[in-house]
Image: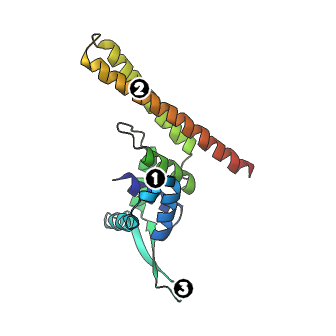
Amino acid sequence: MSGVQDAVLAMLAKEPTHGYHLRVRLRQSLGPLGDSMNPGQIYVTLARLEKAGLVVCERADGLPERPDRKVYALTPAGQQRVTAWLAEVGWPKPDLAEFHLKLAAAAAARLADPVELIAAQRRELLRRLREAQRAALAEPPGSAAVLLLEGVVLRLQADLRWLEACERAWSRAEDEVEDA
């Protein structure tokens, strides 16, 4: 399942809604990256999720000048998928936009604390960093594997710095909500 599909499911966990509203929320969550989103992508995603039994579609009464609109809601299987997605801490090939959507969706639906999700990712990255450093030390100096392992270490260190920035931003956001 793609990150966009998981993000759509998580956004539906907050409340059933229309495809257009989901698209607006995704674009807002992604900022400038959301501008490249194909307007029809959300509807294709919703159709796939419905076919997979993760969402149901109902007709909502429209305004007199508008036809009935479709409202999408999670099924129990969809709710289970959201819970599993939020608990995932893998980072083999980080998709920063997907992780950002996970934080935004978790916060919007109040399903998980974004700072706790960041902490779980940090623990996973630190574990992988220790493994890569140990592996690099075990290689003979000058071997080609050392160069690759150094690249892995540098990438993990950069990802850890980005997580620190995420934590600062989400901690400020939580402080602002508490002060309000």
How far from the left and from the top, in percent, is residue 125?
43, 31
Amino acid marked by disc 2? Leu
In whole angstroms, how far apart are the C-alphas of marks 2 and 3? 55 Å
The image shows residue 75, relative to residue 134, as above or below, that is: below
**Crowdedness near tag 3: few (<14), some (14–19) or many (≥20) residues, C-alpha within 10 Å:** few
Q: Please state if 49 lies on the left or on the right of 29 as rendered.
A: left
> Label 2 belongs to which residue?
154
Quarter-wise, where is residue 172 in the image?
Answer: top right
Determine whether the residue tagged by mark 2 lies in a helix, strand or loop.
Answer: helix
The outermost residue toward the bottom is 64
At 34% from the left and 13% from the top, the residue drawn is 137
Residue occupied by mark 3: 63
Q: Amino acid at mark 1?
A: Leu
Q: Distance from label 1 to label 2 (Cα)?
A: 25 Å
Q: Tell me the residue that label 1 is attached to.
A: 33
Question: Which residue shows up at 49% across the image and 36% down it?
Answer: 120
Give percent across and percent down for residue 26. Answer: 48, 59
Q: Earlier in the sequence, mark 2 or mark 3?
A: 3
The residues tagged by marks 1 and 3 sit, at their Cα atoms, a distance apart of 33 Å
Estimate how packed mark 1 is, as few (under 14), some (14 to 19) or many (20 or more) residues with alpha carbons within 10 Å: few
Disc with the residue nearer the chain's start (1 vs 3):
1
Please provide percent x and percent y for residue 101: 47, 51
